[in-house]
Amino acid sequence: MMIKKRLIDGKSISLSNYTQTNWHPQLYIENTFGDLKEQIRYTAKKSKENNHIYICEHRDIKGLFWEKLELHHFPSDVQDLSISIASMFYDDKVILLADPNHLSGVNREAFVDQQEWSLYEHVDTQQRFIKEFIFEDNDEDEENDENSQLNPKNNNENRKRSILTVTCHAARRSNYFYWNGYSLILLITLASFCIFAIPPHFTGNRIQISCTLLLTSITFRWTMNRSLPAISYLTSMDKYAIMCIFHLVILCIWHAILGSLIYLLIPDLRVTNDMWLAYIDQWVFMIAINIFVIIHIILLIWLYLVPLKHRREMAKKDLEYQQSMSKEKKILNYTLLSI
């Protein structure tokens, strides 16, 4: 009688040993890593809108989950942290959908790496289906419905499983890498233009300083790569560092070519300001610095339009999420006052 009264009042009741005598969707986490510690409980609640009784499954899960890192835009990257929920049944019996009436949420205060990452408030959901591989099986003993799920001999090729992926997003706090990565590489490369202040006939000094800057840039790149996992593609910082290394190599080659021309064409190996080699050296300096500036302007535009655009979209979704949550609170307060 007490349980019935609680249901009539719209309160939830706890269902003990529900799975032993009743059907349940047999949910599991697809992207788990290792063993999970979880507590599963079931509750029932009567809806005031249609007087239907709804069974709800609650899970308290603690464990490790794997996620593929996307480091193309490092250090301005935004990573997805996902949990994929699937069912042992095929889509003809279970289809997983996100609740359209209740928004998902994440506890930002419990996020551990707040110094390195900024966790966004909104949560995205995605429904997808995966096809099962059909294997030949000669066993004919499985006759019940549950075992036929595991023996797809009689299943057609269109049978799929429903998966619901719940995703939150974390943006890397990239100020450290901007100051200790991009800016230092930029300063090392800018120092290469100071070599043009040395007279052209001091070829040995020019090449020596250029090679020293080149080795410094390569060593610095190796040091920065230690903060990244081993990946098969180049990040945006890698591309920038390699571009600056090529810039230093080209300048080294130019200084070597200029020294060879001076050795072959000028008997006393001294270049004055009125010689054509000095004019060519000045033109190379102007062309190199203009190209360097144009490339950096293009990089800044790309940074604003591609990686930072993704962050602006995430911030916009956060704002929409906050507005939706405030509307839900207003509706809830209005309902409580009406009661």
Image (tube, rainbow, N blue to C red):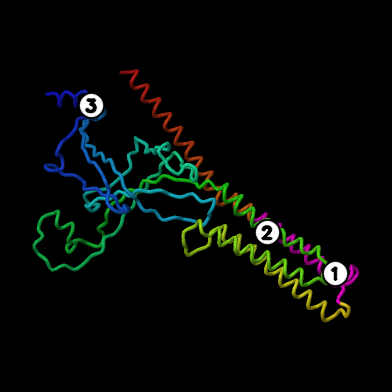
Q: Amino acid at mark 3?
A: Lys
**Mark positioned earlier in the residue sequence (1 or 2):** 2
Q: Which residue is mark 2?
A: 188
Label 1 crowd (10 A; few <14 / some 14-19 / many >=20): some
Q: From the image, tell me which residue sits under label 1.
A: 278
Estimate the x, y position of residue 281 in percent, counting from the top left: 81, 68
Determine the CA span between mark 1 and mark 2. 25 Å
Number of the front mark, 3 or 1: 1
Q: Secondary structure at mark 3?
A: loop
Task: Give the quarter of the figure containing the C terminus.
Answer: top left
- Disc on the earlier residue, 3 or 1: 3
Give the SS element for disc 2: helix
- The residue range painted magenta reads 269-298
- In the image, taking residue 260 as reference, residue 142 lies left or right, namely left
Using the image as rendered, state which of residue 278 and residue 333 is in the foreground: 278
Where is residue 74? Give x, y as percent: 53, 54
Q: Is residue 276 highlighted in magenta?
A: yes
**Quarter that holds the N terminus:** top left
For the residue pair 291 and 324, the one nearer the viewer reads as 291
Q: Residue at x 23, y 65 (%)?
A: 134
Residue at label 3? 11
